[in-house]
Image: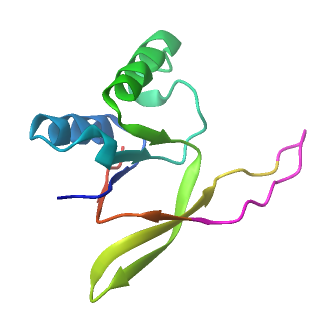
Amino acid sequence: DVTRCVIYGCSMSALTCIRGLLDIGVAPVSILWLHDQPPGPAAFCNHDKLVYNRMLDGLANSGVKVLANTVIVNLKSNNNYLTHLIVKSNTSASAKRPAVEVAPTELECEMLIGCSN
């Protein structure tokens, strides 16, 4: 039984992977969608706010967790089995505000699936 399955990436492939996991019976509360894009409509939904919000509402209603604007900085394992991801906010500096340094967070994870564009 998967304690935490992390889908990493902001793409239609990531959403398809999540749908597949749900279809084969993985509990939604065991799935975390982690991506490095800021919250808001993404390219995979043609930057359409209505489509993006509908998709997020569907995930939230199913119990799938979403962690946006976050990157993986390290992995932890035990006897070559993945146990944790170390993640941190993908906040960067801009002309209007300085970068905010956020301490990395450790997440339990038994399965990591990377999905690119």
Residue at the image point whose x is 83% and y is 45% from the top = 94
Q: Is residue 81 left or right of residue 50?
A: left
In the rendered image, residue 28, in percent from the top left (x then y), is placed at 28, 38
Residue at the image point whose x is 46% and y is 29% from the top = 43
Question: Which SS does the magenta portion mostly show?
Answer: loop
Q: Quadrant of the C terminus?
A: top left
Image: 50 above or below 91: above
Q: How is the image coloured?
A: rainbow
Q: Examine the image and state in which quarter residue 97 appears.
A: top right
In the rendered image, residue 45, in percent from the top left (x then y), is placed at 41, 22
Span of residues in magenta? 94-105
In front of the other: 42 or 17: 17
Q: Examine the image and state in which quarter residue 5 appears.
A: bottom left
In front of the other: 1 or 101: 1
In the rendered image, residue 37, in percent from the top left (x then y), is placed at 55, 41
Residue that sits furthest to the left in the current view: 24
Q: Quadrant of the N terminus?
A: bottom left
Residue that sits furthest to the bottom in the current view: 79
Residue at the image point whose x is 50% and y is 20% from the top = 47
